[in-house]
Image (cartoon, rainbow, N blue to C red):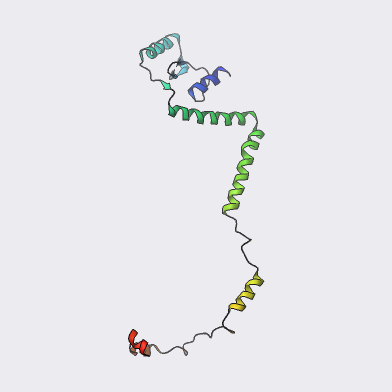
Amino acid sequence: MTETETVNSIAMSFMSAPVFMVMDTHEHTYYMTPGPENLTVITMADYLTSVAEGKEQAKGGSGVLMGIKRVFYDLISLVLSIWQASRWLFLLMFGLPTLIISFICYSLCCMEPLDDIPDEDEEDEEDEKNCPYDAPPPALTSESLPPYDSLENSPVKSKEEKKQE
C-alpha cells in the first residue's frame, strides 16, 4: 500500500499527494490541513500547535456511524479497484449477475402466463353444451317495447298485492 492509499484508507476519502495529516492513535481520530497547496514550515508548526491545544476539530473515530461509513467506503473502493484493474473482470463479476437477475425479474413480473389459457376448441364445445338457447335472443325494436305512457299510468303494486296474485 502506498502512502496515498494509506491516507485515503484512514480518511475514507480519495485524496492526492501532497497531504499533511496528524493522527491520534489512542482515539482513532485524525486532523487534516485545510489547504495543502501553501504548506511551509511555519504554517505546519502553527497547525501542529493548534491541534495540540485542541483548537482544530478532529475527524474519524471508532463509533458505530464510522463503522458503517467504513463498510461502505471499503465496498466502493473495492469496486473501483476492480474496475481500474480489469474492465472485463468487472463486467463479468457485476454485469452478468445483474443481467440474469434483471431477466428473472422481468420474467416474473411482466410476461403473460401461457399455460393457463385453454384451447379454443375446448371453449367452443363447453359453450355449446352450457348454452340454454338454440338461437340468439331477438333484437329489441321500438315496436316490441310497450309505450312509455302506459308505464307511467300503471298503478304500482305493493309486495302484498304481488303475493296475492
Vertical order, 8 against 53 (above or below): below
Pick the residue in front: 80 or 158: 158
* Residue 64 place in picture, x, y as percent: 43, 28
Q: Which residue shows up at 65% across the image and 37% down it?
A: 92
Q: In which quarter of the image is residue 126?
A: bottom right
Q: Which residue shows up at 64% across the image and 41% down it?
A: 96
**Residue 162 relative to residue 8: left or right:** left
Q: Quadrant of residue 77?
A: top right
Numbered marks: total: 0
Q: Which residue shows up at 61% across the image and 78% down it?
A: 129
* Residue 140 place in picture, x, y as percent: 49, 85
* Residue 104 place in picture, x, y as percent: 61, 48
Pick the residue in front: 19 or 151: 151
| Residue at the farthest front position | 164
* Residue 101 place in picture, x, y as percent: 60, 45
Quarter of the image for the C terminus: give it.
bottom left
Pick the residue in front: 158 or 18: 158
**Residue 33 relative to residue 2: left or right:** left
Quarter of the image for the N terminus: give it.
top right
Vertical order, 26 against 144 (above or below): above
Vertical order, 13 against 130 (above or below): above
Vertical order, 69 against 126 (above or below): above
Q: Can residue 95 be seen in this view?
A: yes
Q: Can residue 156 be seen in this view?
A: no
Q: Which residue shows up at 43% across the image and 11% down it?
A: 44
